Amino acid sequence: MCGIVGYVGPKSTLEVLLGGLKRLEYRGYDSAGVSVISGTGLETRKKAGKLDNLVNEITNHPLSEAHIGIGHTRWATHGAPTDGNAHPHLGGPTAKLSLIHNGIIENFSELKAELLAAGTKFASETDSEVAAHLVAAEFEKTGDLPTAFVNVVKRLHGAFTILVIHEDQPDVVLAARRNAPLVIGVGDGENFLGSDVAAFVEHTKRAISVGQDEIVILRANEIEIRTFEGAPVAPVEFEVSWDASAASKGGWSSFMAKEIADQPQAVADTLMGRLESDGSVRLSEIDGLSTEDIKNIDRIVMVACGTAAYACDVAKYAIEKFARIPVQVELSHEFRYRDPIITKNTLIVAVSQSGETMDTLMATRYAKEQGAKVLAICNTQGATLARESDAVIYTHAGPEVAVASTKALVAQITAGYLLALFLASERLAAGCDATDEATLRKLGQELLKMPARVTNVLEGLNEVRALGKEMANAKSVLFLGRNVGFPVAMEGALKLKELAYIHAEGFAAGELKHGPIALIEEGQPVIVIVPSPRDHDSLHPKVISNIQEIRARGAKVIAIAEAGDKEVANFAEHVIYVPQCENIFSSILTVIPLQVFALELSGAKGLDVDQPRNLAKSVTVE
Ligand code: F6R
């Protein structure tokens, strides 16, 4: 889950590489490095720590003008984040080859032993350096860089995107891809490579996704793609819909703050073209699934990790309620390795912002092998998950740069609601049990109102901001919720853990008395997501009882409740109100104060909200 960028063309290579790395830094930020080939040969600079350290290094030791180069931002797997382990790695005794790698080379010990036996000297502890020496040695033997490159990548096991440049071939960047992302940016007299389109979107919106086990031979005026076996691959171009400004902070203090503010748009854009004003849902993306196929679905398994898995938990409530199809939510990594029961009537719904999360890719590949159909909910055009699924519902949240997911989550939840309404309507048409059409339309119309309500929530968060600041010294915060409030509670806890590094747990409020209530002591802050009191089957009274149970034991309660809920104020130290809506859709609103709370608390502790320690945006290793 490192970030990779490559360039060949007339522009200042260093500027292109550093600009690309800046946009990819969310993928990893333990160290960074670049190599360029100038008139005097291969030049490399690399440095542990954030990209700024590399920029300082280059200021102190400038690079020559160059028109070809590669750059890398690292999330350490093999070897600590040191200058020596930073990429690029140089290969061969004369160090004329430079290589960057994203992924893990699983058979690196065996390959390293072979190189050590041949007398190769290593400068790092990484698996990647092995590949650099192997390609350099193979080039010595064959005299042809693409042949040498492909001979080596075919020997590597695991996951990799690898980019290589060589001083003796100063007009070409080579790239290979297996189980890790790689996209080509197509320019005019220049071409780009990136882990995702963010790497080059400020220069070109024309892109080509590189397929599994393919290599790219990239020159300023030529793009050649071949399989590892040497067969030519016809490139399929697509247009990137993001623009560069979408991936810049635009005056906000952090990407996360900006992305929180982007949420009304993320919800509106995800609904756009899919939800008519009469409340009916059209999901042309899944036209491939006939009404008969939908009728035959006997179970949906939703696979995802982290925040995306909480979006699935919310979707489960909606799909089961409206479409009456049983839904199982599975963490991708647990699902894949426990011999799960999958039949041809199981629909797999894989949810991922990046579309590159290796755990989710492995789970969906496994499910496909068992004969299941896979529907992806994904935010990144041309991502591996999207390419490998039978159908894709793109969330239109735009690029999410902050490591902690915010707008991608609300867009995933929105897509989940759309899917629930769509499946219900289709099942009804096929004569199955589901919510009646008039109710579905009414719900669809309610969903159309959500972007405005999200704006409303964002306008009323002063109290949450103040609380976040005040609670900077909290040692632990608990979160409680029921129904769709339960995954929101889990998400609130995750945000606090990852951003503020404090202990936080989310619980189903009803579960409290079965054990976790023992955690409550005098002064323990507990944030409770309170359901609407307006539904006839509302869980409101039960949650109020849960609040009373914890308050009796000293908890300090912050309630997130619906506007007009007067009762809750009697039982909480603070109440943050969000607009009224159908309770099932409330997760889109109640999650926002929790995002802002974590953002403020993290800021008050002086932490980096966009790049929390030990994390990376895209987890492309298992
Ligand atoms: C938390 C967060 C992660 C991701 C998870 C899955 O804020 O962002 O938990 O949700 O790593 O990532 P994607 O959605 O890219 O598959």
Image (tube, helix red, strand yellow):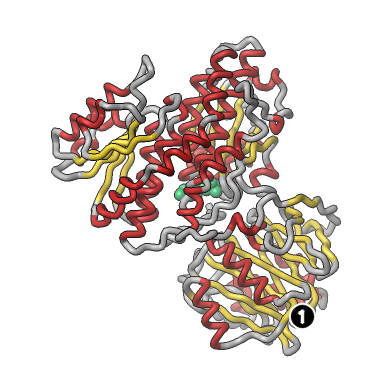
Question: Label 1 CB, ligand 1: below 8 Å?
Answer: no
Give the vertical position of 242 relative to 536 (above or below).
below
Front position in the image: 23 or 75: 23
The residue sitting at 20% across, 31% down in the picture is: 571
Q: Nearer the viewer, residue 224 or 439?
A: 439
Give the total of numbered labels: 1
Query: Quadrant location of residue 540?
Result: top left
Q: Is residue 55 left or right of residue 98?
A: left
Q: Is any atom of residue 308 visible in this view? A: yes
Q: Locate the N terminus by quadrant.
A: bottom right
Specify whether 387 is left or right of 545. right
Residue projecting furthest to the bottom: 40
Asked if one can make out residue 161 in the rendered structure from this viewpoint, the answer is no
- Relative to 50, is 228 above or below? above
Q: Residue at x 62, y 13 (%)?
A: 428
* Quarter holding residue 289: top right
Q: Say which residue label 1 marks.
A: 140
Residue at the location (14% across, 36% down)?
Answer: 553
Residue 327 in picture, x, y percent from top left: 51, 26
For mark 1, does the 10 Å Cα neighbourhood hold few (<14), some (14 to 19), or many (20 or more) residues?
Answer: few
